[in-house]
Image (tube, grey):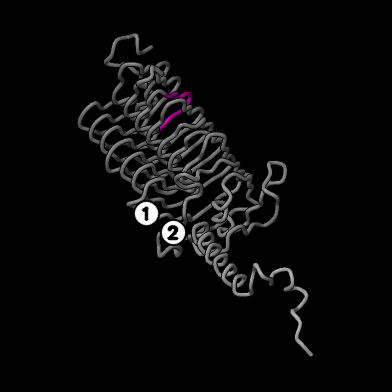
Amino acid sequence: MASRTPRHWQFWVGPQCTVADVLIGLGVAGVLLAVVFALRSEHGQPPGAVSGGSGTPQDPYRIATCVELQNVGNFPEAAYVLLRDIDCAESAEWNEGAGFFPLGFYDFGFSGSFDGAGHEISHLLIRRPSTDYQGLFGKLNVGSEVRDLTLDGDIQGNESVGGLVGWAVGGTITNVTVHGSVRGRTGVGGVAGVNQALMFNAHSTALVEGTNKWTGGLVGWNYKRAVIDGSSATGPVTGGEFVGGLVGVSHGAAIIKSYASGNVQGDEGVGGLVGYVVGSDDGRSSTVATCYASGDVRGKKDVGDLVGKVDAGGTVMGSFTQQEGGKAVPFVSSLSTANTQ
């Protein structure tokens, strides 16, 4: 009896598509899938694993482990919520010791929402001293939201390095606290290396070290449109040029009702609160209002207990340093009174 092609192959096998064609097609598809998996899961874990949810604001993906946390980077536009405190000590062994891979990286910034629900991520390790955009998030895009989260970790990078985020291009950061240490070269901050977001009630106790410029206990470079409100930094800060207990440089941005109490050391443009306050080149002013600093400040040039240097477009008002004995000393700028009140 003549053999017959199995029914389930009849659609695929014919004059225009042979079995060989099918096998070749499957092979190409397999290679493509392998490339996608490798790109989207550098840490070696299967992409997309979460503990439930559909990724919408009404039903966010639920995150319960460090592996699931790492998988947030596979879908950076979705909504997420932590189910419990997460210990990321295992991240120290990932990527040949480089550790956790930042969520939302380079051109794939995080644009969704991340609700810490009052929980803590602890023992997060990132060790990439020659790579930019390092932090729990590499980049936060316009429209993103991160809230109600405590983070403890050891973060090392090159430029744009922060405990929470390397560069917040936009979005909103609310009720976030960072502990541990953050180290980098340029644009280094306890919460954000570079901040263009709205930041409310953000706090850092982290040790922050920068070897070049723009180093701050909370934010390294507070840039155009950025607002820091009701926030603080209490850890020690060390840097080179433009170093501040709270912010290294505030450039066409605002700092309101915030304080710093950590000791600050740098070379030039060193302040207990902000190293350098200056307006942006598009005419946007930079304001520091109702703030104070109380840490010891040391530097070589343009050093101030509150602000190291103020340039055109910079305004400091209603702010003071708190010296030993609790005495409040109002800030007085070397610029004209048009820039100070």
Is residue 225 at least partly visible in the picture? yes
Q: Tag 2: residue type? A: Gly
Indicate which disc, 1 or 2, sits on the residue closer to the N terminus.
2
Vertically, is 55 above or below 313? below
- Determine the CA span between mark 1 and mark 2: 8 Å
Considering depth in this image, is 123 or 264 the residue closer to the camera?
123
Which mark, residue 99? 2
Vertically, is 263 above or below 45? above
The magenta-colored residue range is 253-260
Q: Could you say where residue 10 lies in the image, as x and y percent from the top left?
A: 74, 72
Q: Could you say where residue 53 lies in the image, as x and y percent from the top left?
A: 70, 51
**Crowd around label 2: few <14 · some 14–19 · many ≥20 (10 Å):** many
Is residue 136 shown in magenta?
Answer: no
Q: Residue furthest left?
A: 300
Q: Tag 1: residue type? A: Arg
Q: Could you say where residue 313 lies in the image, as x and y percent from the top left?
A: 35, 16
